[in-house]
Image (cartoon, rainbow, N blue to C red):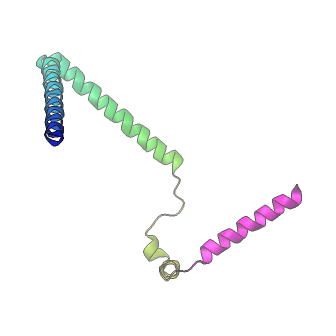
């Protein structure tokens, strides 16, 4: 009896969701038809979309130029084959070197304080 009631509640929830999705879809379609019905509104909407697209593209290009300076570009797998080979073989030299630098910096800070 409890299992049947649970299944009935799940079906009711599914039906409610379908109804809500259908209503939202119908309302969206109606709004789109209303806006696109008039040629002036259609053209205005196209111009706004183009303007927004241009603004976003310009903003992205500006951000990329300012935030991501590229000093050396290329394909590292082919440009630095020795380094790539070492890393591929499991070399930890870079990690050890970085850790040693961090330790030295901490030691210098302790000495200065």
Q: Quadrant of the C terminus?
A: bottom right
Q: Which quarter of the picture shows residue 17?
A: top left
The reply to whether the magenta stretch includes residue 93 is yes
On the picture, is 37 further left or further right than 79? left
Instruction: Please identify the dominant SS of the magenta region.
Output: helix
Image point (43%, 44%), residue name: 61
* In the foreground, 22 or 107: 22
> Where is residue 107, by image quadrant?
bottom right
Q: How many marks?
A: 0
Residue 102 screen position, x and y as percent? 71, 65
Q: Horizontal and vertical percent for residue 42?
A: 17, 22
Is 68 left or right of 50, judged from the image as shown? right
Horizontal side of residue 71 vs 104, given as left or right: left
* Residue at screen point 28% across, 25% down: 48
Indicate whether 97 appears above or below 51: below
**Magenta stretch?**
91-113
Q: Residue furthest front?
A: 1
User: Residue 100 appears at what percent x and percent y?
Assistant: 71, 71
- Classify the position of the N terminus by image quarter: top left
Image coordinates for residue 54, horizontal then vertical, percent: 34, 35
Looking at the image, residue 6 lies above or below residue 44: below
Answer whether residue 110 is magenta in the image: yes
Q: Is residue 102 left or right of residue 19?
A: right
- Residue drawn where x is 53% and y is 78% of the image: 83
């Amino acid at each position: 009896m409890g299992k049947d009631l649970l299944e009935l509640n799940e079906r009711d929830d599914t039906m409610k969701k379908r109804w809500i999705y259908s209503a939202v879809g119908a309302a969206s379609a109606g709004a789109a038809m209303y806006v696109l019905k008039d040629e002036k509104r259609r053209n205005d909407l196209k111009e706004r979309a183009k303007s927004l697209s241009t603004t976003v593209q310009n903003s992205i290009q500006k951000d990329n130029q300012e935030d991501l300076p590229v000093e050396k570009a290329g394909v590292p797998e082919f440009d630095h084959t020795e380094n790539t080979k070492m890393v591929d073989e499991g070399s930890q030299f870079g990690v050890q070197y970085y850790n040693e630098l961090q330790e030295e910096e901490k030691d210098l800070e302790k000495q200065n304080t």
